[in-house]
Image (cartoon, grey):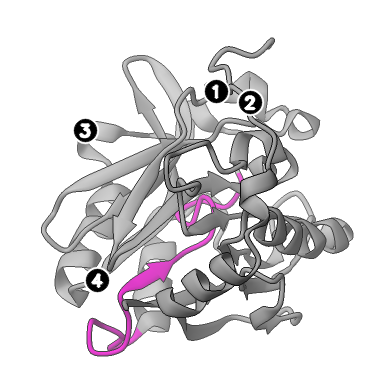
Amino acid sequence: MSTLRTTLVQCDLRWEAPLDNCRMLEELLGELDARDTDLIVLPEMFATGFTMNSREMAEPMADSHSVAWLREQARQRDCVMTGSVAVVEAGEYYNRLIWARPDGSLSHYDKRHLFRMAGEHERYGMGEQRVVVELNGFRLLLSVCYDLRFPVWLRQQPTPSGFEYDALLCVANWPAPRRHPWRTLLQARAIENLCYVVGVNRVGEDAKGLAYAGDSMLVDFKGEALIDEPRDRPFLRTEHLERQALEDFRQAFPAWQDADPFTLLNEIPR
């Protein structure tokens, strides 16, 4: 069965400096390409840091430099690149996770749960659709940071096979004071959904004085860490998601057969 080589990119971000961040990431990534990986995962708002200055910093989706850079990096490196960007489209602002393929095509997911403690719900629009993408025979559910706290939104949806996705991907700017919930929730989402979980967070300190501890992790379907970097410095780590191991565990421990049926509504109170 298939393998998905996944690279986690933990890095410090320059505040509201897209060109500087793109240059920094190119240097950090070096010659990493399809010989080494299938998927490169960058943090939330990799071009700016977690800015609420959406009116000035969000880039028009149609001609976004950061989105174009992500697409070009995917083409040059011949692998999928993903990370979120502040964009504006049709007069609305979004914290948008971009999934850039080597052939130039894009998919995207708009962050559903907006972090009201920072006023994100007043500066960005709420996403309305869950998005599942496919790569190397794996289905991946996309999510951004605060989404991780809401298990209903991320729960496996009923399908004839029992599984809607095989891995949950979450990119974040998750502050260091709340590092314990970040680590715990990554493992919980893996256990309850019988899937891999990829969580990529930033390090450093932003212009508001918030510190970020990283703690980027790749967790398997038992909640055990395959990558666990509890340190506050940049790094690249690549690990393999193994389809056969996932299928074997799902068959040996078919908890999904006892899951409660439910319907997920698109509209929630604002």
Q: Earlier in the sequence, mark 3 or mark 4?
A: 3
Residue position marked by numbered label 4 in the rendering: 79
Left or right placement of residue 152 versus residue 160 in this view:
right
Q: Which residue is painted at 59% across and 80% down in the image?
A: 234
Give the magenta-colored segment's residue range.
30-50
Left or right placement of residue 231 versus residue 143 in this view:
right
Seen in the picture, residue 203 relative to 29 is either above or below; the reply is above
Left or right placement of residue 80 versus residue 25 in this view:
left
Residue position marked by numbered label 2 in the rendering: 262
Q: Which quadrant of the rendered structure holds the N terminus?
A: bottom left
Q: Residue furthest left?
A: 103
Residue 147: x and y in percent read 65, 41
Q: Earlier in the sequence, mark 1 or mark 4?
A: 4
Q: Secondary structure at mark 2?
A: loop
Residue position marked by numbered label 3 in the rendering: 62
User: Does the magenta-highlighted stretch encompass residue 45?
Assistant: yes
Left or right placement of residue 90 versus residue 111 in this view:
left
Residue 170: x and y in percent read 56, 55
Mark 1 crowd level (few <14, some 14–19, many ≥20, 10 Å Cα): some
Q: Which residue is painted at 70% across and 54% down in the image?
A: 192
Q: Distance between the Cα atoms at labels 1 and 4?
A: 29 Å
Q: Secondary structure at mark 4?
A: loop
Q: Is the magenta region chiefly helix, strand or loop?
A: loop
Q: Which residue is painted at 31% across and 85% down in the image?
A: 32
Amino acid carrying label 3: it is Ala
Indicate which disc residue 243 carries: none
Residue 13: x and y in percent read 56, 64
Q: Earlier in the sequence, mark 1 or mark 3?
A: 3
Q: Which residue is painted at 57% across and 33% down in the image?
A: 53
Q: Earlier in the sequence, mark 4 or mark 2?
A: 4
